Image (tube, rainbow, N blue to C red):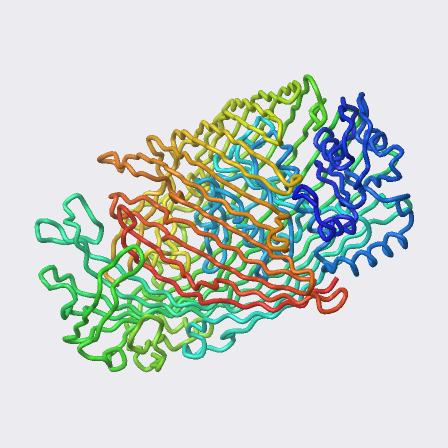
Amino acid sequence: MTVRFRCDFRAFLLVTAGTASLVIPWARAEARSIHIAAQPMAQALEALGRQTGQNIVFTPQQVAHIQVDAVNGNMTPAQAVRRVLAHSGLTAESVNDGGFIIHSGAAASTAEKHRASSEKSEKKGGVNDIEKMFVVAHKKSQNEKRTSNIIMDTVAYDPFENLGGVSSVAQSLIQLPGVTGITDGDEPRYISVRGISPDLNHTTMDGITLSSIGESGSAGTRRVNLQDIPSEMTSRMNVYKSFTAEQDGDAIGGVIDLIPMSAFDHKGLYKYLDAYGIWSSKRGGVGANGLSGYAPHMGEGAKGTFSDTFGKHHEFGIVLSMRYQERARNTTKNWQAYDYDNADGTSSTTPGTSWDGHVRPSQYSTGEYANDVTNIGGSGKLEWKPTDRNLYMSLMGWSYARWEHSVMDKEDYNLKNTVTSEDGMDIPVSSLYARRRQNEWHRQNSGIIGHIDWYKGRHDLILRAGYTMEDYNDYQPYIAARAYPKKLTADYTGYPSETGMWQQGPLSNPTAAQTATWNLYNDGSYQTWEQASERVPSVRLDYSWNTGKNAKGFGIMSGFQWRELTLDHNEQQTYYDSTENFTGQMLQSNHVPWNNIYPETFIGPDGYKFNWSSLTVDQKKSLYNSGISNYRYRENIFDGYVSLHYIWKNTAFIAGVRADATNYAGWIPQINSATQTVSSGLTKQGGSYINPLPSFDVVHHFPQDVTMHASYSQSIGRPAPGQIAMAASESCGDDDSGGADCTISKGNANLKPRRSQNFDISVDKWFNRGNGMVSLAFFSKWIKDDIVTSRSLYTDNTGTNYQVTMPVNAQSAGVKGIEFNVMDRNLHAFGQIIDLQANVTWLKGHESYSNGTSVVNYNAMIYQPSFIANGMMTWHIPQIKGALRTTVNYSGKYFTSFGATPGASDGFGNFLTFNLGFWHQVYPGITLKYEVMNLANWQPRYVTGDHLQYVDEMDNYGRAVYFHVVFN
């Protein structure tokens, strides 16, 4: 048996899955020219599959020693298959969604025969019941890439290969070349495509734009939180990297389209239920912080999917999915703030032009976090595909929520600015701070989408309408106290780098925190109530003629889309003036945090139960901070496009233009900074822009399964709502990284949308009957008016470290890179069957912007690492009806904001994740699965500096172990 044939085991997986379709859903079977030379049956079926674009499933034993006469003429795929099989004794079974399964003799006509055949084959092949259909799903995804006229990558839904309990879309997409996961603690939350900010992706469900309020709505970003969208509501996830007029024009990184699962993806009933337990290694402050209700290590979860067809002719379909998870995600964080020495003997908290390259610590901080995370939600989809009409209709809805019950207990050692002190020697400690911040973060993403597809001959008309929404709210009590120890000094060791920071050494008085007098301080304690909501109604109509996979000659696609985005953000803050003695309410412990040598001192009271009425309200600051944070934003987008196709032999030409017309308005508060007052009501500021976005693509299919794509396109990147409408917003929360306690974000109503020229070329070589591929791609993006976040730092008189961020248009920006990808989902090695994928991406970028006094140049864009590598391997073990799965993801360091001076820039350090999974069937329909997440124990690091050369935050989330019991 040669490598181009699938072994019995793999073929059985495909056959018993009930469908072998590798074509676009609802593809039309049109007649085309077929030329099959006289040859062995195996080669004839392979050639026919290539010419028709259909997946034809057979085993080597079925076609052995069978010769085929030449077949030539204009015919449909079904007619061609019958001609090839004529007089062979073989028959072909067509499946719901396209493609054919070859049978020896008459195809089984009843469900009983099919089931009996499956059971017999299983005894022979030894495979896991639940894995069967997912092999087909992977093949479908591979063929979509293979036949696409757009440069794209795709990953199929597979509950086994997607490790971790949440099994989010983000966790799936980070397998793909050029994709970086932007982490939220120990999980990816957003993705960056080809080094471009997540705000510059366009993310859709079935072509309808998803709503997202970013982190909290206060910044009003466009990045879609893929951490909260489960992969089980999809059949596959596509990332389009080159753009035609047929796609949304507001993407520079990529268009991410989530394809919903369909009951017609497979035959008969599909059910999947996974119940699991979780053990997380990090305890954090649980048990030491004096608070109850937080889990130290354990969690649990369950998720499931059900789908089936029904009706007289099985013309109706239903898909239901659900998930629940509660887990402990505790952590310890170490922060460090720096003083930057200048050549004139002074020092600054922000490095300037006179910085001499030497840094010293100005603050050591440690935070212990107790955090319980709960995910719950579900989705449903109803479908109708009548057998006697050229019609498909569906209605889909979903709602997923995420709660985080969190407490941060932080302790700061603030050091005096002593320029003349020797490194590491007896640095005076000016003050100690203890802070407790508690949060009840709640986020909910919901939506409903209707889909109507009418087709006849070469005509296809698709109408889609949707309404997506996301809501966020949080209640945050914050209590802080401080102490001024006398004659306390601290030592430190080492020197900061991009992998580590200074370590605090011995104190001259080891019990200083325990014996100090602690007091509250004015405006150090406050309560915050925050709410945000985003709504996105959309309608789109797409028409095509003669643009199907088997089309020849001229074709046309055209369409129209309307979309509205509205965002409301409201925040109320109450600050308190109090300097009362708080020593009696401090909690002294024996708990020594990670990377520390002394026990932590905690704020004692629970902020949810604290007697806030005993404190005096700072009315002026409360009203001011509440008023400046509120804003509204509305945006209306009207898009239309025309795209011309011409297919000539093995070459496709696509030329089109999309007209993007946008009007927007922001309502912001009127602020008097001098008097620290906010006028009542909001003031409207608005604008509009129109952009023609041309594109041109060429695709050529060479012999030996080699395909080349070349593409030129123009696209835009819209400013985020908060970048335009926000007056100012202050947040002190878990999202503040890089040594900052609080972030002050300001908007910029004068921002212009980014405009990008995109150049792409790729060459794909397919082998092993479409199971394997080697791909090389080059891309270059020239971006005008890019939007970057300018960052400055300061420390106020309470010892609180602030970062102030504001968006500005860059003068010029761009990124170019090379992607290399190799994949084989049917690799035979040493008698084993292995699925393997590995990809690497090299990127080089540039960014230039004015900080008001000079032009600042960087050799990278924000969120752009210089190197990305992803690898996945699944070793199938038929003897135990299971497999071993490992995934590795690596990303180099990247900027997250540019400083007002280069040294004040902030970023995320190089990051590696190594996850391991193993599963085996213990009884028909029951499988056990085990997972270890972050096996390498690589923890997040945040970095600062003009070259991101200093770590200013190190986090430790530990590892997580999952144990699943899977039923089907």
Question: Is 802 displayed left or right of 629 in the figure?
Answer: left
Q: Quadrant of residue 555?
A: top right
**Residue positioned 19% across, 71% down in the render:** 490
Q: Quadrant of residue 643?
A: top right
**Residue positioned 38% across, 56% down in the render:** 736
**Residue positioned 16% across, 54% down in the render:** 358
Looking at the image, which is closer to me, 597 or 478? 597
Res. 704 visible in picture: yes
Q: Quadrant of residue 418?
A: bottom left
Question: Is 233 displayed left or right of 656 in the figure?
Answer: right
Question: Is 326 displayed left or right of 74 in the figure?
Answer: left
Residue 674 screen position, x and y as percent: 27, 47
Tell me if residue 345 comes above or below residue 586 in the rendering. above
Residue 203 screen position, x and y as percent: 56, 41
| Count of picture labels | 0
Residue 447 screen position, x and y as percent: 64, 47
